[in-house]
Amino acid sequence: MRWTSRAFGLTLGRVDPLIKELIGIVGKGAVLSERDELLVYECDGLPQHKYAPRAVVFPKSTEEVALVIRALARSKVPVAPRGAGTGLSGGAVALNSGVVIELARMRKLLMIDPEHRIARVETGFINAHVSRAAAGYGLYYAPDPSSQAACTIGGNIAENAGGIHCLKYGTTVDHILSARVVLQGGEVVELQSPEEGGPGYDLLGLFVGSEGTFGICTEATLRLSPNPQSVRTLLADFLESDNASRAVSAIIAAGLVPAALEMIDGAIIRAVEASAFAAGLRRNAGFAIEAFRQNAGESRLADPPRTGEQVRVVQPLLLERVPQCPDDMLLPHQAAEVPRPPFAGKYLIAHR
Ligand SMILES: Cc1cc2nc3c(=O)[nH]c(=O)nc-3n(C[C@H](O)[C@H](O)[C@H](O)COP(=O)(O)OP(=O)(O)OC[C@H]3O[C@@H](n4cnc5c(N)ncnc54)[C@H](O)[C@@H]3O)c2cc1C
């Protein structure tokens, strides 16, 4: 087969001048343009839509990002920023033979300031590595998408990512303090939200969640949170989804904000029970609820109830939804107050 398309960086043996220009900016080892090298960049976590980019560029600094953006703008070539490519909406895919700007090589931890509870990172830094870096100071980074072992802070900012704990702690937008952004014309700006109630537009808030369409974020300052002082976990299984749903509503209606609340369906329960993570749920159960509660030392609640109190409120709410529940199914004395790791603890199990 003969490749005549510019999409693969070659035009009948001649090196694409744009690729040459990009190599001039970032170096030879930082541009991919061969067809087989580009295959992995055809899609993100949504493999239904595949488009081969014209090239993939790996800048190592904000300055290189700006130069690349300017070169592509001059040539009117579309750009798609990319972090780890775990996105599920096709955002990191370059349409119309565009160029992917891959931030994976910009992954430095620039600073941790435990006194002010902040960290500054390059945006190719992986989400879970922020908490790992902060752990020695008793701090962690709250936004926890399930993909956190792989996804990058840049991708999190672009998608306003959040995970199981966002019910209580919010999503990325609640934990980012400033961002260095290369705009479409190559200008570099530092975005910050105005003081609460202060004048000015919240451009940082606008940028977070804009899916890479407003510019490329190269550095960000993140808010760190203190590790929880105690953790309690409640787990209950239900045979009917209606009962499980009512239990969720009752917990929220009781005015408590659990750190996380999750329903798991029967197929997943059976998979978990067949694994090393078996929690003692009935394998024929239809639904389960986990209510993790924690006192994180600091909370948006003015006077957060301690975890023990929260559990005492929630237990009867769960029990009410299962009138036949045998008395010995709830085992409060087995609950453990554990300072670390943040979201572990013994389960209180109620079968419904
Ligand atoms: C198994 C799995 C579980 C997941 N769980 C969750 C979850 O619990 N919660 C959740 O919110 N999401 C979840 N996701 C989706 C995805 O992981 C998140 O959206 C994550 O934030 C994407 O990060 P990334 O580094 O992979 O970004 P990519 O997929 O590479 O890019 C995502 C978007 O961000 C843009 N982008 C990337 N880097 C930058 C940058 N530096 N500047 C500007 N724009 C940029 C891209 O152009 C694209 O539009 C999950 C995905 C998978 C595969």
Image (spheres, rainbow, N blue to C red):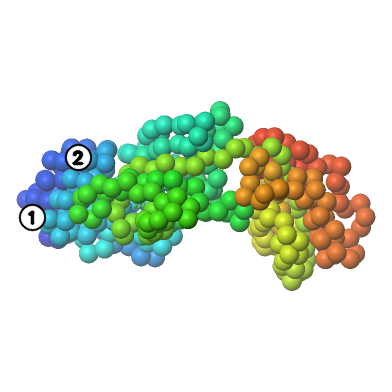
Disc 2, disc 1: CB below 8 Å? no
Where residue 130 sits: x, y (%)? 48, 38
Query: CA gap, disc 2 to disc 1?
Result: 24 Å
Q: Residues within 10 Å of mark 1 (few under 14, many from 20)?
A: few
Q: Which residue is mark 1?
A: 12
As drawn, the residue found furthest toward the bottom would be 242
Where residue 247 sits: x, y (%)? 76, 64
Sequence order check, earlier mark of 2 and 1:
1
- Under mark 2, the amino acid is Val
Task: Answer left or right for 161 relative to 294.
Answer: left
Q: Split into 4 quadrants, where in the image is the N terminus?
A: bottom left
Query: 247 or 15, which lies in front?
Result: 247
Residue 4 image-quadrant placement: bottom left
Up-down: is 236 above or below 114? below
Q: Secondary structure at mark 2?
A: helix
Q: Split into 4 quadrants, where in the image is the C terminus?
A: bottom right
Rendered residue at 77%/51% (across/down):
310
Rendered residue at 14%/50% (across/down):
71
Where residue 162 sits: x, y (%)? 52, 54
Residue 244 image-quadrant placement: bottom right
Q: Which residue is mark 2?
A: 26
Where residue 270 sits: x, y (%)? 70, 56
